[in-house]
Amino acid sequence: MPTVYIPTLLQNLTGGRATVEADGATVREVIENLERSWPGLRERLLDQERLRPNISVAVDGEVSPLGLLERVSPASEVHFVAAIRGGSVCIRTVR
Amino acid sequence: MEFLCEPRQSLLECLRDVIGLTGTKEGCNDGNCGACTVLMDGRIVNSCLVLGVEAQGAQITTVEGIARGNQLHPVQQAFLQNAALQCGFCTPGFIVAAKALLDQEPAPSEERIRLWLANNLCRCTGYDKIVRAVEQAAQELREVKA
Amino acid sequence: MSTAEMTVVGTRPIRHDGADKVTGRALYGADVQMAGLLHGAVLRSPHAHARILRIDTSKAEALEGVLAVVTGADFPDSPERLVDLGEGDTPLSYIRGNVLARGKTLYKGHAVAAVAATSAHVAEDALDLIEVDYEVLPCVLTAPEAMREDAPILHEDLVTKEFGEKTGRVSNVAEHFRYSMGDLEKGFAEADVIVEREFHTATVHQGYIEPQNATALWNNDGRVLIWCSTQGAFTVRDTVACMLDLPVSQVRVTPMEIGGGFGGKIPVYLEPVAALLSRKSGRPVKLVMSRREVFEGTGPTPGSYIKVKMGARRDGRITAAQGYLAYEAGAYPGAMVGPGAMCIFAAYDLANVVIDGFDVVVNKPSTAAYRAPGATNAAFAAESVVDELAEKLGLDPLELRLRNAAKEGTRRADGPKYRRIGCVEVIQAMRNHPHYKAPLPGPNRGRGVAIGFWFNVGLPSSCSLSVNADGTVNLVEGSTDIGGTRTSVAMQAAEVLGIPAESVRPTVVDTDSVGYTAVTGGSRVTFATGWAAYEAAQDVLRQMKERAAKLWETDAAAVEVSRGVFRAGERSMTFQELAARLGETGGPVVGRGAVNPRGVGGSFSGAIADVEVDPETGKVTVLRFTSVQDVGRAIHPAYVEGQMQGGSVQGIGWALNEEYYMSADGAMLNSSLLDYRMPTSLDLPMIDTAIVEVPNPGHPFGVRGVGEANIVPPPAALANAIYRAAGVRMDRLPMNPPAIMEAIWKQRD
């Protein structure tokens, strides 16, 4: 099962655990399954069905341009890191 | 050539906005970056510190006048061969200043080149390749004369 | 494929825009001329923090020659919303507010109003006629000050966020985050030696020689046309469209040649103002910043307060590292403290780490990115502490780094494990470099080293290639060229096609003419736009194989191409020969590439610096400097060297002289290029470069972004050199003569 690394400031939602396992074929599925075990995580990671704009997801050490759509394998590591998009404007209006 | 200007317009402004020669650049407008370097009667000046009216009767050389028709001047050629420019904004000022140096001194040392060009700021290159380009141009000009 | 087998990659062709750049023919933003052009000027707040009580523009409007005056009230009425500008969601009022203030001005230089007139001089005169009543408020200028309980608050609606959660605290701290790994206490308990230090760095500016500029025409068909100096035409398009409540297709941005950017020309300042003035006046309007406005009204990089504590065992293994980074965001949130925190210990394989980062607003211009933003401040702190650790352990500074160097598989504090990286190779290259072994005799002289990291980005790029009948190719791309990238991109296409670099003609075009392309920044262009060109070239080859197959009346599958020669069995044809026959085989061949690549490779860089410190004046002379960097693959070595040299010199200026010298009431006292002292040719020796190539497996040519990592180590390398030359460990930037003398005198007491 994929291993999800929980950002330090969210670890209060996982009982202090720095890593948890959650199944899924895509990052989206993994987050949905994470939420079942650890309620409250989803809201901190997502906004309106999309990754929060200041967060990127890295799968197996590589920042993924596909974000939630990125495929994940059973041995994968999933990290949530600060998004660095160098001024690339996302014309999506968040709320 | 003749141009009409207000007393408060600098030579730089006259070159760029009145005459339309935009090769000479404005970086600071107070004589501290050298992007506006032109030759006035053979001498290097910051054209932002010269009034347009002061140019009366003077021979002004700008970057547009360095190449001979289709032929780039050895300084220009050397800048390209040595990758001595990145954004290119400071380049016109450097070309004019370097040409003036080599007109006077055919074999300047590295230190002499650095001193001569100290009024021209470059933020992209760190000056290394600019100095090498001027050294190369100096050598080529010496060979042409020999 | 090694560089030795390639025919274009690794060579040094003359850049395609060379002739225009050395003759003054290349057109930069301020060179724009058009019929009916008006000139604009911007009125800026004289106060670091003030409420705007009243603005009266009537006298300015009445001045002969003035055709329009605008303020923040001229933005369309839009409901407040959040917009994603690349590093998080920002309120629309913040984005617009920095362009034209409403309600409050938050820094000296904050734009308050703008005029358009028949000449720049009339526009300036008009500014004096605009009346503004301010209620001056107390200001706060550094992160520690702004974080205090009793600090004046800049934004009444700014609530501290911790990883997306609003804490409910109104303060100047926009965000606090934390990275952690392992057990810090245990790590320090295992250490034989611990070093703990505090550092302060001053605000510095990117220092591009070309000031910001923008010309806008709000056309009769409702489209807004913009010509400007920018690192990202699409960013300008999208931001302006957002601010003006227009669909993006209603805005076209033409990026002119750009005179330096280094991150400072990613945000938008003048474009929306020019557009508003154009709409009001019915004419095109050009705005060009003065040098003073560049200092006071654009985006310098954060000043910072950083604490670093590191512990190591006698055998040289670092057992624990702790970092506290409080960065000044300037007037609006968004300091690049996140990247700083990701990079601070990135060169080391650590088990126990805690890093806290704070994004803090202060009454200074709203900060922007500056070449590896956040990382240089962090490295100054961390690499000074590592140097001190080495000294206390009696280890060579490079040896200590080697024993702890990050490798493929090392886990970083922010979580992910490294893929293939060149940290070890860079340190070894430094150790083996003649500079490191050269004797340095004489009093008051010392040598220092430091290393640094930047992760680089990918992001979207688009490219199209059209084949001409004479065998040359037109390459159309959208990445504004600050450092010669139109050539490095063209070279990659040329390598794939098997034709000379000179046969590919690159052009950077406007936002109507090419697919979406992200900013020129993040060291991404040679990597990502290069990828797009690579894909487009592969597309061209696929199509041309089919054409050859048609001519030879065989299957496309039977045609091979290598080094620009197409073959099927006994028959062959060069790219040039086949190009001449496209018309008769089906028409034009146009290839396309559009990418958002993964596989980004980070870059490590090292600096070796020799200095002499005058013990009576504190003046530091740089005697010798070497920059070492893992670039993956050097597409055009001369421009790679140029990036290394340029970044090093910016780092040297940052280290030794540059700072925003602020008065107590928040005014920058040295807002000219005389007193904001950037290095001149006379201040420097030659900058030696050593290119290390650990190819990035994620790119077809192995490219790693090269532009940024090289600015990261110089300040620390110089600090470490100054220590060996003068016996003082500097804890603040810049390390200018007064600062050095103070440190020397303090030491004597």
Image: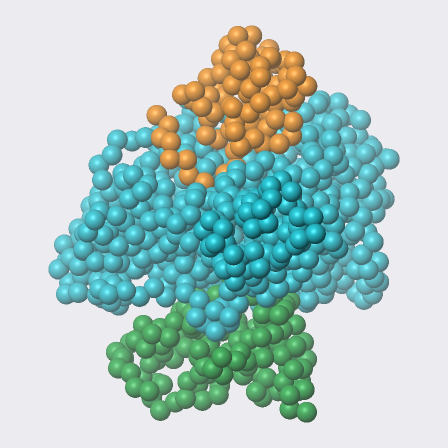
Q: Check the picture and name the quadrant holding the C terminus of chain B.
A: bottom right
Residues C222 and C590: in front is C590
Residues C139 and C459: in front is C459
* Residue at 60% in and 44% down: C554
Q: From this view, report whether residue C649 is shown above or below residue A47.
A: below
Q: From this view, report whether residue C172 is shown above or below residue B49.
A: above
Q: Can the viewer see residue C178?
A: no
Chain identifier of the green chain = B
- Residue most toward the front? C553
Determine which quarter of the picture holds residue A4.
Answer: top right
Residues C506 and B114: in front is C506
Residue B143 location (% of width, % of height): 67, 86
Determine which quarter of the picture holds residue A72.
Answer: top right
Q: Colour of chain A?
A: orange
Residue C596 location (% of width, % of height): 52, 38
* Residue at 83% in and 47% down: C396
Residue C80 location (% of width, % of height): 29, 31
Q: In this rendering, would C391 be left or right of A9? A: right
* Residue at 33% in and 74% down: B20
**Colour mode?**
by chain
Q: Check the picture and name the quadrant holding the N terminus of chain B.
A: bottom left
Q: Colour of chain C?
A: cyan
How many labels, in total? 0
Q: In this rendering, would C283 be left or right of C421? A: left
Q: In this rendering, would A13 be left or right of C432? A: left
* Residue at 26% in and 58% down: C285
Residue C612 location (% of width, % of height): 72, 64
Q: Can the viewer see residue C438?
A: yes
Q: From this view, report whether residue B66 is shown above or below residue C680.
A: below
